[in-house]
Image (cartoon, rainbow, N blue to C red):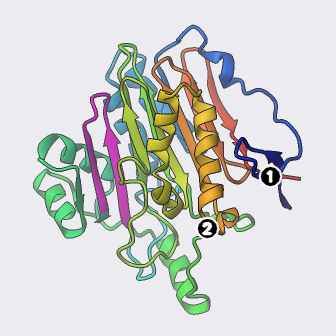
């Protein structure tokens, strides 16, 4: 059962509260500015972090680290919301969105990309080898082919079977959170932020989007400022969940700006969720989670619904944490 916490915000808005969560381990981990460090969304972030850590622990660049890290779930057919093996759209097509951003504010992204296993790498090529920030659809695919990316079918037999079952029995799209049907979770984007030993902060985000979305839908993941934002002087943030809610509030940009104003990463993520709760009707039926990392190596997270997890890796810890949530599971 999900029930809302109640508490009183500064604006006088009363909402439900059922207790105070314990202080996060992350609040004290980096008091001495321990770097490098990498954080990422969901359980598949553990394996992604390991790949990123191989680069970070050898003194490598954070941008290389986040690209290599995100490529792990992109290539894993067991991760049904990212890359190869992703859940298709309503027409049976696997369409992918991704973005990258470095400490200097350079950014690249792709949307509605098909038949390319690693959209995060295409996004980096857009950033480095084109005059643009975003390419989509056929243009993104053409660019990928011209830059040596292999074309391949990303629809696995398992996902094709599920799609055919949906077409036969349901044919109803829902962007709402799936509390009970974990096999078809709609929101398990891989977002990653890394700070290397030289203090360079980079981020990446990749997803196959919502299950059975309308053909042509692009979510928040490739939108700079929504699914991902990095400011090398302040920190970075990335989002997972119902992308429409994140786009309407420019959630990741908001988190970074709140950190610029002095909020901790966790406080900034919480405020971004509160903004959604105040501005967007029906938000309680959706999941959105934010993670953030500042240039001191401090990190935090917050989400709408319970059970959003994020992975952390440093020289002293390898950990999967549960983020605090607006709603609590009783």
Res 309 seen here: no
The numbered disc on residue 14 is 1
Magenta stretch bounds:
95-111
Q: Is residue 184 above or below residue 100?
A: below
- The image quarter in which residue 128 lies: top left
- Dominant SS in magenta: strand
Nearest the viewer among 253 and 92 is 253
Name the side, left or right, on which 202 lies relative to 76.
Answer: left
The outermost residue toward the bottom is 168
Mark 2 or 1: the one toward you: 1
Residue at 32% x, 23% y: name it.
Answer: 61
Q: Look at the image and say whether residue 109 sits in the magenta stretch.
A: yes
Alpha-carbon span between mark 2 and mark 1 = 33 Å
Question: Going from the N terminus, do you reach mark 2 or mark 1 first?
Answer: 1
Residue 291 placement (x, y as % from top left): 55, 39
The residue at which mark 2 appears reads as 184
The answer, for residue 106, to whether it is visible in the render is yes
Where is residue 273? Give x, y as percent: 62, 49
């Amino acid at each position: 059962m999900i029930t809302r916490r109640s508490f009183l915000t500064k604006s006088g808005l009363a909402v439900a509260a059922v207790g105070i969560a314990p202080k996060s381990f992350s609040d004290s981990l980096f008091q001495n500015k321990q770097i490098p460090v990498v954080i990422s969304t969901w359980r598949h972030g553990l394996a992604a972090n390991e790949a990123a850590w191989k680069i970070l622990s050898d003194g490598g660049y954070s941008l290389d680290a986040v690209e290599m890290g995100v490529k792990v779930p992109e290539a894993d057919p067991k991760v049904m919301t990212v890359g190869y093996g992703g859940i298709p759209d309503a027409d049976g097509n696997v369409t992918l969105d991704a973005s990258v951003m470095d400490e200097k504010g350079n950014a690249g992204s792709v949307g509605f990309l098909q038949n390319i296993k690693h959209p995060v790498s295409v996004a980096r090529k857009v950033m480095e080898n084109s005059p643009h920030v975003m390419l989509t659809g056929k243009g993104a695919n053409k660019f990928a082919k011209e830059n040596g990316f292999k074309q391949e079918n990303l629809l696995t037999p398992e996902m094709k079977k599920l799609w055919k079952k949906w077409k036969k029995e349901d044919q109803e799209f829902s962007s709402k959170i799936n509390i009970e049907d974990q096999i078809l979770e709609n929101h398990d984007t891989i977002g990653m932020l890394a700070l290397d030993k030289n203090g360079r902060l980079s981020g990446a985000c990749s997803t196959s989007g919502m299950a059975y979305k309308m053909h042509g839908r692009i979510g928040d993941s490739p939108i700079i400022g929504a699914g991902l934002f990095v400011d090398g002087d302040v920190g970075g943030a990335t989002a997972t969940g119902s992308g429409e809610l994140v786009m309407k509030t420019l959630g990741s940009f908001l988190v970074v700006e709140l950190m610029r104003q002095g909020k901790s990463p966790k406080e900034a993520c919480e405020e971004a969720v509160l903004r959604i709760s105040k501005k967007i009707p029906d938000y309680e039926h959706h999941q959105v989670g934010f993670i953030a990392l500042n240039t001191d190596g401090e990190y935090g997270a917050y989400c709408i619904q319970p059970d959003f997890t994020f992975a952390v890796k440093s020289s002293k810890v390898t950990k999967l944490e549960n983020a605090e949530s607006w709603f609590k599971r009783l």
